[in-house]
């Protein structure tokens, strides 16, 4: 695609490459530090104990391989704007239809989960008093309109906002790690009488205090913490110099996982023993509360709140681009493929916004925000795994049918097909793990409904156009 100004691209009907390397790098970091880490890690710690560290490293490695496969595919043909394009080209139209609409629903369910998280964190400023269902719904509507307004302006504004949202998250985690190290090395005693020490990691039942069952149970929320890293691939269509910037963003993922996930949680569980961490409270907020630093706890709550808003911002951006791509492939309504004068797919944004407003009704039916969060995150986790599996399937087809492209690739997936098969087996096994916990089993049982809806849509509407 030619580079030019945003207006020109709007006239051409193409997305603008308005995002720089600075934007892409921070979007990648923002995707790797999501609501699942800030809000979900408390529950994961309660399920798995210190073995959560191994869970994050294992999942992180598998997600990194998915990203390497995604990166090689996108760079093999710069006409590919997202995984809709290469899955359609390599597997068939049904795969593009499936992955596009499923990824759209992924971010809609995450948006609904984020609404629950926003309400939950705002309770801190309401003296911990839960909001009524009506108040919760009004807060949700206000959040949706705010994010929609931001996304309707320009792509560059989206990148700028994500840059600062991600920077806030990075600074917060760095400060948490530094404060935690200070508390550990000075033998700080928390408000509960606990002395901060690395020995908490193994003194309370060892690294696997809940046994193998607890270790497996920790995977659901942990995987949700990683969803969104593939957003780098979604933004590739609007990034300058993707051959240079995409590999840099993907290759830095392991470092981010070790620093932002593993090291941060080592600090959290060293300051507060894992068995004293409340699963309903963000351990990041709790660390400062334990230290008796009230102002810092307030600031951390604001940081976590900005993290949730960042997740919603990324989600709304991503859903609109998926609908835009589906429309261009004649797999969605034509109206979704139209850009406004700022080169933004406004109609697609409006549709996603309306669906999120429908999700605000969840506050009435499931007023328990933690339960609503778990239900929504489990469903999105299942859907994201299905998307990742299609990416890996596409890679296997590409490796077999386009050997010349693989041979000249400068960004190859380490291990090639063997790595693909290992990751595929891992993620299929992870879906089975979701059946072990009653709350995640509910979403697992509901998820086939989406596959039925997709099949009806494909065969009754899209297939008839062929």
Image (tube, rainbow, N blue to C red):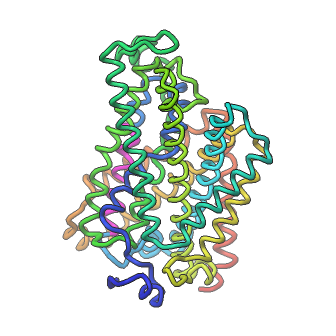
Residue at 52% from the left image edge and 44% from the top image edge = 35
Q: Is residue 216 visible?
A: no
Quadrant that contains the N terminus: bottom left
Residue 77 versus residue 143 in the image, above or below: below
Residue 39: percent from the left, percent from the top? 54, 38
| Residue 419 in the figure: left or right of residue 14 | left
Residue at 50% from the left image edge and 53% from the top image edge = 310
Along the viewing direction, whichever of 451 and 163 lies nearer the viewer: 163
Residue at 68% from the left image edge and 79% from the top image edge = 461
Residue 360 versus residue 61 in the image, above or below: below
Q: Residue furthest bottom?
A: 11
What is the span of residues highlighted in magenta in the rendered image? 57-74
Residue 256 within the magenta-colored segment of the rendering = no
Residue 109: percent from the left, percent from the top? 62, 54
Q: Is residue 149 visible?
A: yes
Q: How many marks?
A: 0
Residue 446 versus residue 338 in the image, above or below: above
- Magenta region's main secondary structure? helix
Along the viewing direction, whichever of 47 and 268 lies nearer the viewer: 268
Quadrant that contains the C terminus: bottom right
| Residue 333 in the figure: left or right of residue 90 | right
Residue 42: percent from the left, percent from the top? 53, 30
Residue at 35% from the left image edge and 31% from the top image edge = 177
Residue 238 versus residue 271 in the image, above or below: below
Residue 423: percent from the left, percent from the top? 39, 48
């Amino acid at each position: 695609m030619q580079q030019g100004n945003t207006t020109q691209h709007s006239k051409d009907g193409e997305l603008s490459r308005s995002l720089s390397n600075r934007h892409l790098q921070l979007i990648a970091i923002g995707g790797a530090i999501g609501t699942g880490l800030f809000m979900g890690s408390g529950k994961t710690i309660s399920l798995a104990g210190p073995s959560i560290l191994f869970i994050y490293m294992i999942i992180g490695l598998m997600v990194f391989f998915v990203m390497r496969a995604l990166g090689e595919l996108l760079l093999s043909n710069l006409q590919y704007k997202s995984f809709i394009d290469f899955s359609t080209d390599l597997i068939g139209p049904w795969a593009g239809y499936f992955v596009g609409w499923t990824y759209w629903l992924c971010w809609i369910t995450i948006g609904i989960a984020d609404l629950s998280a926003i309400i939950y964190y705002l309770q801190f400023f309401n003296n911990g008093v839960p909001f009524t269902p009506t108040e919760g719904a009004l807060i949700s509507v206000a959040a949706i309109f705010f994010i929609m307004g931001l996304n309707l302006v320009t792509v560059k504004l989206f990148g700028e906002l994500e840059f600062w949202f991600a920077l806030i998250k990075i600074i917060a985690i760095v400060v948490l790690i530094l404060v935690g190290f200070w508390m550990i090395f000075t033998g700080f005693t928390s408000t509960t009488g606990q002395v901060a020490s690395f020995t908490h990691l193994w003194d309370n039942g060892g690294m696997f205090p809940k046994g193998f069952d607890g270790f497996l149970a920790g995977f659901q929320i942990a995987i949700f913490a990683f969803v969104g890293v593939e957003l780098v691939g979604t933004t590739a269509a609007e990034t300058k110099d993707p051959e240079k910037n995409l590999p840099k963003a993907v290759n830095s993922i392991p470092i981010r996982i070790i620093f932002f996930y593993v090291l941060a949680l080592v600090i959290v569980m060293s300051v507060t023993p894992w068995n004293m961490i409340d699963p309903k409270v963000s351990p990041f907020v709790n660390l400062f509360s334990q230290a008796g630093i009230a102002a810092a706890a307030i600031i951390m709550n604001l940081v976590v709140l900005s993290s949730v808003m960042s997740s919603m911002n990324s989600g709304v951006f991503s859903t609109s681009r998926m609908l835009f791509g589906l429309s261009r492939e004649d797999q969605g309504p034509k109206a979704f493929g139209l850009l406004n004068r700022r080169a933004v797919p406004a109609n697609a944004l409006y549709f996603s916004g309306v669906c999120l407003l429908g999700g605000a009704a969840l506050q009435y039916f499931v007023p328990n925000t933690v339960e609503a969060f778990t239900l929504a995150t489990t469903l999105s986790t299942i859907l994201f795994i299905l998307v990742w599996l299609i990416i890996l399937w596409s890679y296997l087809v590409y490796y077999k049918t386009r050997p010349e492209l693989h041979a000249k690739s400068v960004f190859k997936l380490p291990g090639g097909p063997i790595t693909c098969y290992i990751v595929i087996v891992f993620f299929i096994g992870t879906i089975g793990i979701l059946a072990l916990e009653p709350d995640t089993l509910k979403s697992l049982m509901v998820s086939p409904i989406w596959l039925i809806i997709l099949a009806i849509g494909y065969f009754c509407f899209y297939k008839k156009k062929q």
